[in-house]
Image (cartoon, grey):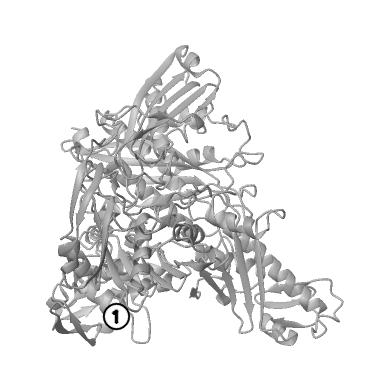
Amino acid sequence: MTIIEPRKHGSAADGRVGGRLSRFEGELKITGNATYALEYPVENVAHAVLVQSTIAAGRVVSVDASKALAAPGVLLVLTPEDDLGLMTAADWFGNRPENQPFHPLPKVVRYNGESIVAVIAESREQAGEAAKLIRITYEEAPAVADMDDPKASEGKLLDAMTVEWGDAEKALAASPVRIEAEYRTPREYHVAMEPHGLTAGWDGEQLTVWEPSQWTHGMARNYAEWFGIPLDNVRIVSPFIGGGFGSKGVALPYGAVAVAAAKKLGRPVRLAVTRPQNFTSYGGRAATRQTISLGASKDGVLLAIVHRGASETSVYMDYPEQTGAATPILYKVENFSSQSRVVPVNAVTPGALRGPGKNPSAYGIESAIEELAYKLAMDPLELRLKNYADHDYQSGKPWSTRRLREALTEGAEAFGWARRSHEPRSMRDGKSLIGWGIGCGTFPVIRAPSSAMIRVLKNGRVEVVSGAIDMGQGTYTILAQTAAEALGVSIEQVDVVLGDSRLPGSAIAGGSMLAGSITGAVHKTANAAREEIIGLALNDPNSPFRDTGANTLVVSEGRISVASGDGPSMTLPELLSVLGRDELEVTRNTLPDDAQSASDRMNAWTSMGRVQGPTMGDTSMHSWCAHFVEVRVDEDFGTVRVSRMVSAFDCGRLYNPKMVESQWRGGIIMGIGQALLEEGLVDPRNARTINNNVGDYLVPTNSDIPDIQVISVGVPDYEASALGGKGVGEVGIVGVAPAIANAVFHATGKRVRDLPITLEKLM
Amino acid sequence: MPRTIHLTLDINGKAHPLDVEPRVTLLDALREHLDLTGTKKGCDQGQCGACTCHVDGERVLSCLTLAAQVEGRQVTTIEGIAGDDGTLHAVQKAFLEHDAFQCGYCTPGQIMSAVACIREGHAGSDAEIREYMSGNLCRCGAYNSIVAAVRDAATTIAAGQKAEAA
């Protein structure tokens, strides 16, 4: 556990919900004192290095580890021949196959870059050197390199993802104006600055894993089930995470390898996944393609949308990247059809990466809508407003809140959209062609039960405790604000303890569901703590408030007193003292009253079983945004620079605008990378990820990014969450890539339908 | 056992004796041998900037520097830029105020680069700051705030130097 103490701040209002309190744990991060997973001092630690496959498919015939075992410092070599005795763990929804062994170093190779062997030595340098001496003999099998491989299938149709209403094909055929186009996105990677890895140590049957985790309880369950030990025996420690973006929500095979090695050696093992190995040790965003057909009347009323999408998956699991996720809910349309397929290829199973589904989906529909605007000779902003969805046509439900119209109009105003000339290539500055484009984004409100503990201590401190995590979204900060406000104490008194599976369970930090879920739990717990304090003060024989005759008391700035201002007033530690108590501890959760058993709680904290989607209630709940982009394209060289951006968001109430603005910009910047730079390249001969490093897989640098103006147009949405917020982390990236593609079209007259938009596509 | 060499490294003004293999990088020496984990490993191949330290006042990538190369030179890490009494460096203060980080993992490298960037005289404009801070990747995307923080800290530092001169 790491106790985070607060920093000084500007104004008292900063310490309340909605205040611009600076990052609560910030001082630890700027001084180098925040301790990340691989930095915990662990006695007698051994170091593991992975050896990954160099073929795309086949079988490991033999592993010659003799030279490696003879190398200095080598303690152990694990190969597919070693039965580690592990069993397959449950999936995210808690479903677990029976009696299915799990081999984290498999004999059957399913993709290039799959971990096959682990070398463990006294030092990382020794393990790395010995790993080079491993000789693996394979029996190679035919492989499918990617979805463009001639051997790739058209994909498996996923019926559960089909969405239909009206008669889209018929309405499309009857539409006076039609467009149809295919849009493609390549493999994209998380590239969190902290590479994956862990330190694992056993103490008898007790396992401690120091590993960056977006979900400490869920990952503890992974390890417990793999190793057949009680959940309580596993502790995941993760108070700081060096970025996750969807990649650190589940334990991965290399984790099992390190834990198994630690068990075999009887000493702790540290395994640092190298940066190149990060490209194949877990999946990034799948490559996608989608065909979108739009039908409209001549005056721009959208009559039909037909969407046919496909995304890559692995040969061993169906993981859809839902290119139809945003398509049905951005616009009013009476006739709609969407189908999705997954195309198995020899690659690691793709995973969730910022704005999963909605992101490539918005690239498709938001590019298509501008293509339609040009076909209609209509301003793209006007077309979007004309087809504004008054309710959710997919679910038939009203929106809880949807301020996308305000995002579009206020964003346009701030950007100066009215000054745009519609014709492509009609705006320039010397050799630079200037283009302006719009892209809308959305992400659903997802909620999950969570729990928290509050401890009021005799020394005047108040601890907020939860197993929830902070990977930079601002969990520490907003929980301190939430607790301080609800309990009635100064933020200076509050400590926040997070990131440990031994602490009360919480929603995953994913799908933008954590902030709304955990602030709800902390708010409930802090209110309960305040009520308990007041109850004790009114009823305890030793309390001076007992004789005041007051029905209730107020707690404010850490003092408890009678509302009228008459009578006694004391600090919470003074009250604890007269009550003869050392501390007061309150734990609450947001599970329903009829689901409070131990197994209910275990399942809620370690599976997605109780996660609620956006339309499970009476309304349809989503975050919304509209991005306005200016690009400058060098007419001779085709280089694209984003020179200006305004993005307007409806994310409901903002718990801390300073943190939120950082997250929005972060999503937008990742979107700029997606639009212009990011592309996993696959060697068609052997399905190897060629550019498996951050010098070749390009992510945005400081000089790629202009000043980005972000605007909040949201209003509190108390259906979406207890404190009125909607998710902020995912939605920022959604709609950025099409906004840039649309701006590039406006600048150049060239429509690029496959990301990233690189210069050769504009020549 | 492999051969080790004995080094004495001057890190943040203190002498640190160290027995390591010759192939150990400055980054691994700091993180694995000296418990100075503020310096981060993001790629271990000189591409991300997370491991940026100062050697004799100039920024270097400690993952591409052998520990043995810096003996007899002054190494400064993120742990060494605050005052002896813990007073934060102007760049650290500005990073906190402008929220110039999220996850915090690239932050020590960003701050070490920023301190040097200002000292080099490369913080004259936002465009210049962007260019001279581009060796440090930030996947959380705090670039706008990093530019604001460097600009702000450069002004503070210049004002301090002016006051000292007067």
Who is closer to the viewer here, B10 or A740?
A: B10
Who is closer to the viewer here, B77 or A62?
A: A62
Look at label 1 and name its amino acid: Gly
Please indicate whether residue A80 sits to the left or right of residue A64 in the image: right
Residue A502, given in percent of the width and then of the height, sits at 53, 68
Looking at the image, residue A647 lies above or below residue B33: above
Looking at the image, residue A455 lies above or below residue B145: below
User: Can residue A660 be seen?
Assistant: yes
Binning the other alpha carbons within 10 Å of mark 1 as few (below 14), some (14 to 19) or many (20 upward) gives some
Looking at the image, residue A9 lies above or below residue A640: below
Identify the residue at horizontal 38%, vertical 55% (top origin).
Answer: A252
Identify the residue at horizontal 69%, vertical 78% (top origin).
Answer: A559
Q: Chain of mark 1?
A: B
Residue B110, given in percent of the width and then of the height, sits at 29, 66
Residue A590, given in percent of the width and then of the height, sits at 65, 57
The quarter of the rendered structure image containing the C terminus of chain B is bottom left
Please indicate whether residue A687 sits to the left or right of residue B153 in the image: left
Please indicate whether residue A388 sits to the left or right of residue A397 in the image: left
Residue B89, given in percent of the width and then of the height, sits at 33, 77
Who is closer to the viewer here, A109 or A384?
A: A109
Please tell me in which quadrant of the rendered image residue B119 appears: bottom left
Residue topped by disc 1: B80
Looking at the image, residue B155 lies above or below residue A336: below
The quarter of the rendered structure image containing the N terminus of chain B is bottom left
Who is closer to the viewer here, A739 or A250?
A: A250
Secondary structure, mark 1, is helix
Please indicate whether residue A761 sits to the left or right of residue A400 in the image: left
User: Can residue A22 be seen?
Assistant: no
